[in-house]
Image (cartoon, helix red, strand yellow):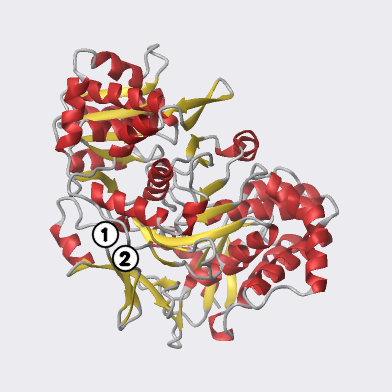
């Protein structure tokens, strides 16, 4: 087996916990701005001292509401300032946070409440109250529910808890914090799950601390410092946004939150983050939107040339640097194109961190070429988010970087990536069978296929369970083809099929926003649907070109021979996507079985 270990300098004491930083920052830098929250359209500073007061106040309220050391508290909300307050307060009260995606169905909430048995529930708004009222009423463990933002009362959950804890002393909170140990569970995160019921991943305070310390021991520490800022817009219920938020807070970075995704570009402009965290789909949409707008405005040729120049310029960084002609072109396109794209990210953004799914090397080179390098990382809920990441000065585009300090990666005989280290969890909540299947003597079996080079850079090639074997015996990993297809300006999602079939095919969906713009610029009826235009020659030519481009990345035997354009996009609501935009292949292949068969019909 091929193996690589990254040494660590940090240590975690038995008495350490993830909430300690709240008190350390309030004591050492009380006036430092740790958060900026949007109040009536204006970003308002929150100092370390003010944040500590809120956390302690809410923790007192949780204790008054009956929270005991080790009790679970469920939190269902979109990304917002109050999420962080409640999360840290749960720890300060000695509790365990159970995040629930704000988009979760009543059935998903029911399972989490049944399995985790939280004693309290915090919901974001009245809509959540209505959506979950029946399952909450049936949940035997839940004793009380708080609502962050309700039309029925002037007092939000945070203030209600602060008011309710007025008779609890601050010393009671400090005793709860002092009783915490690094090995205690800090959070129970239910995997969104592409198959089966979600499993509760139990992460300890030591796991969260190892993630934060590991990130801050890499070269990213040069950007993650006091005075820098980042805007969180990914769901905090997901381990990636949560872990990077904790690491940023620990490092002294000022954090902002937004859940207004449609107006994200405008929010970037007012907040002006120094770095951002996102998933590949957001970077794909920014690129595709800019490309389509350029073509609509008659500047498509310039944009396409600028794209090729950015990619070439980035690739040259790995092969001795760009020549004089390429440097001159890059300077021109920086003024014409790249500067406008950087402005869309707020104008100050120096880098981005990407995780949750493969980014694709071409998109990685493009963004590095325009001056906003995306550092791609790799990890799972079971590894407390990032296990490996590319960092400043240590990047190989196309790889997911090197293990964070303290961690070890190995490649098993069958090509599976296996991981061990302080960020790796030690089991699923009340699920010994699943734990035994996933962990082998401390090694976590990821189910991902890949390789690791002599310098420790990990490259992902696909998923063991998603490997397609054609009727001719050809093994095909769908991930690379799907990444290239999604680079098409009109394409939202793609599912490569062909297991036990004579050739590779694909199901393709259109991006609704891009499709509307495309219809406008191509003289199509504004109310025409994807189904209406399925055989439209202009649309067919556009999709054919995207398929042909994707096929350039694979051999003839692995290339897509036929595809089926679906009438609507996949969505989380329909059960086809996870909250982090991963495809639920089993759901999709079952729902579109007839479409798949039509690909192979004679």
| Disc 1 element | loop
Residue at 71% x, 71% y is: 312
Can you see residue 532?
Answer: no
Q: Which residue is mark 2?
A: 407
| Residue behind mark 1 | 422
Q: Quadrant of residue 362?
A: bottom right
Question: Left or right of 482: which side holds 454?
Answer: left
| Residue at x 67%, y 77% (from the top left corner) | 320
Say how many tags the image has.
2
Residue 110, compared with residue 326, is above or below; it is above
Is 1 or 234 nearer to us in this picture? 1
Picture quadrant of residue 366: bottom right
117 lies above or below 210? above
Task: For marks 2 and 1, give the CA distance.
Answer: 7 Å
Secondary structure type for disc 2: loop
Q: Which mark is on residue 186?
A: none
Residue 309: tell me if it is visible: yes
Q: Position of residue 132 (x, y in %)?
A: 31, 31
At x 22%, y 29%, the residue is 120
Neighbours of disc 1 within 10 Å: few (<14), some (14-19), many (20+): many
Relative to 486, residue 246 above or below: above
Image spot of residue 63 (x, y percent): 18, 24
Residue pushed farthest front? 28
Residue sitting nearer the eye, 3 or 517: 3
In which quadrant is the C terminus drawn? Answer: bottom right
Residue located at (41% from left, 32% from top): 29
Quadrant of the drawing holding the N terminus? bottom left
Image-quadrant location for residue 55: top left
Q: Are marks 2 and 1 in contact (CB under 8 Å)?
A: yes
> In the image, is residue 369 above or below residue 91?
below
Q: Give the x, y percent position of residue 76.
A: 34, 34
């Amino acid at each position: 087996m091929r193996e690589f270990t990254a040494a660590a300098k940090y240590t975690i004491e038995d008495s350490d916990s993830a909430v300690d930083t709240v008190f350390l920052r309030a004591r050492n830098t009380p006036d430092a701005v740790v958060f900026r929250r949007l109040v009536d359209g204006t970003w308002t500073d929150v100092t370390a001292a003010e944040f500590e007061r809120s956390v302690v106040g809410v923790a007192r309220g949780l204790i008054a509401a009956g929270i005991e050391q080790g009790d679970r508290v469920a939190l269902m909300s979109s990304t917002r300032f109050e999420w962080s307050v409640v999360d840290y307060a749960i720890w300060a009260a000695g509790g365990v946070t159970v995040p629930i995606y704000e988009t979760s169905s009543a059935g998903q909430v029911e399972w989490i409440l049944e399995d985790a048995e939280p004693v309290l529930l915090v919901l974001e708004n009245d809509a959540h109250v209505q959506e979950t009222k029946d399952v909450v009423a049936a949940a035997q463990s839940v004793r009380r529910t708080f609502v962050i933002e309700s039309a029925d009362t002037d007092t939000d959950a945070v203030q209600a808890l602060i008011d309710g804890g007025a008779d609890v002393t601050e010393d009671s909170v400090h005793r709860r914090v002092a009783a915490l140990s690094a090995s205690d569970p800090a959070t129970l995160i239910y995997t969104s799950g592409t198959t089966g019921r979600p499993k509760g991943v139990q992460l300890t305070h030591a796991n969260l601390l190892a993630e934060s310390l590991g990130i801050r021991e890499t070269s990213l520490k040069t950007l993650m410092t006091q005075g820098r800022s980042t805007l969180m817009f990914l769901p905090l219920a997901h381990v990636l946004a949560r872990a990077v938020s904790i690491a940023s807070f620990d490092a002294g970075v000022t954090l902002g939150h937004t859940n207004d995704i449609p107006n994200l570009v405008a929010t970037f402009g007012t907040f002006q983050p120094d770095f951002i965290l996102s998933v590949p789909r957001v970077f794909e949409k920014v690129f595709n939107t800019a490309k389509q707008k350029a073509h609509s405005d008659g500047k498509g040729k310039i944009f396409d040339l600028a794209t090729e120049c950015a990619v070439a310029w980035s690739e040259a960084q790995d092969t001795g640097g760009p020549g004089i002609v390429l440097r001159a072109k890059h300077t021109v396109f920086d003024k014409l194109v790249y500067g406008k794209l950087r402005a869309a990210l707020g104008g100050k953004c120096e880098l981005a961190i990407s995780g949750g799914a493969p980014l694709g090397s071409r998109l990685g080179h493009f963004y590095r070429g325009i001056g906003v390098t995306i550092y791609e990382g790799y990890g799972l809920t079971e590894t407390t988010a990032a296990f490996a990441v590319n960092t400043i000065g240590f990047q190989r585009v196309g790889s997911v970087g090197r293990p964070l300090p303290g961690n070890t990666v190995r490649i098993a005989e069958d090509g599976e990536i296996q991981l061990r280290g302080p960020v790796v969890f030690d089991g699923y909540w009340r699920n010994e069978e699943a734990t035994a299947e996933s962990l082998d003597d401390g090694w976590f079996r990821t189910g991902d296929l890949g390789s690791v080079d002599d310098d420790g850079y990990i490259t992902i090639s696909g998923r063991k369970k998603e490997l397609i074997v054609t009727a001719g015996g050809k093994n095909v990993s769908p991930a690379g083809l799907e990444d290239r297809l999604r680079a098409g300006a009109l394409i939202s999602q793609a599912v490569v099929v062909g297991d036990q079939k004579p050739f590779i095919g694909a199901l393709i969906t259109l991006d609704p926003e891009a499709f509307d713009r495309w219809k406008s610029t191509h003289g199509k009826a504004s109310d025409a649907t994807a189904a209406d235009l399925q055989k439209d020659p202009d649309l067919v030519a556009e999709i054919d070109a995207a398929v042909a481009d994707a096929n350039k990345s694979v051999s003839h035997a692995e290339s897509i021979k036929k595809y089926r354009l679906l009438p609507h996009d996949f969505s989380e609501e329909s059960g086809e996507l996870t909250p982090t935009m991963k495809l639920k292949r089993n759901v999709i292949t079952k729902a579109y079985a007839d479409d798949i068969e039509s690909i192979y019909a004679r």
